[in-house]
Amino acid sequence: MNLKNHALWCNGSTADFGSVSPGSNPGGAAKERKEEMGVEVKQYLKHVVEENLNEQIEDCEETLKYIREKILMMVVAHPKMLEPKEENYDTISYIRSEITSLLEEYEENVTKLSILETAKNFPEDVEWDSE
């Protein structure tokens, strides 16, 4: 018999040593552990994502608070805003421009905050289509 033309197949253990295991087709215990590990990984990733979302939400809320305070200070604390005289127009124009820019940033942060809160409250049992 020529052994060069024959390949031997090994499933991970042999009956000669008293046990035959399923080799590359693990039994129930291995499959259960794999599923447990999958659940643990999902829980860890969920925790990391939630932590990140919470930090981003907190940052966004702080930014909104800062913008509100800055606008309030610019409007209330600047006396030239209360005196619309011709010599104050340049200053008033500058302040209005700054406030407009701050309001745009505020709107962007409100949108971002809404998206982050939606993501945070997204249902856990959603099945993602892998196609």
Image (tube, rainbow, N blue to C red):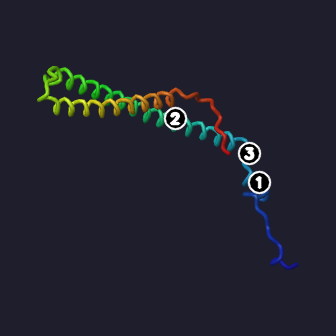
Quarter of the C terminus within the rendering: top right
Mark closer to the observer (1, 3): 3
Front: mark 2 or 1 = 2
Location of mark 3 (residue): 27
| Residue 39 x, y percent position in the rendering | 60, 36
From the viewer's perspective, is residue 37 above or below residue 80? below
The image quadrant of residue 28 is top right
Q: Is residue 84 left or right of residue 34?
A: left
Which mark is first along the chain, 1 or 2?
A: 1
Nearest the viewer among 18 and 125 is: 125
Numbered label attached to residue 18: 1
Percent position of residue 94, x then y:
20, 34
Residue 46's disc number: 2
Q: Residue furthest left?
A: 87
Q: Amino acid at mark 3?
A: Gly
Q: Residues within 10 Å of mark 3 (few under 14, many from 20)?
A: few
Instruction: Tell me residue 55's x, y (percent).
Output: 39, 33
Is residue 41 placed above or below 86 in the rendered structure? below
Left or right: 104 in relation to 75: right
Do the residues bearing badges 1 and 3 touch, measured as CB atoms within 8 Å?
no
Asked if residue 80 lies left or right of residue 101, the reply is left
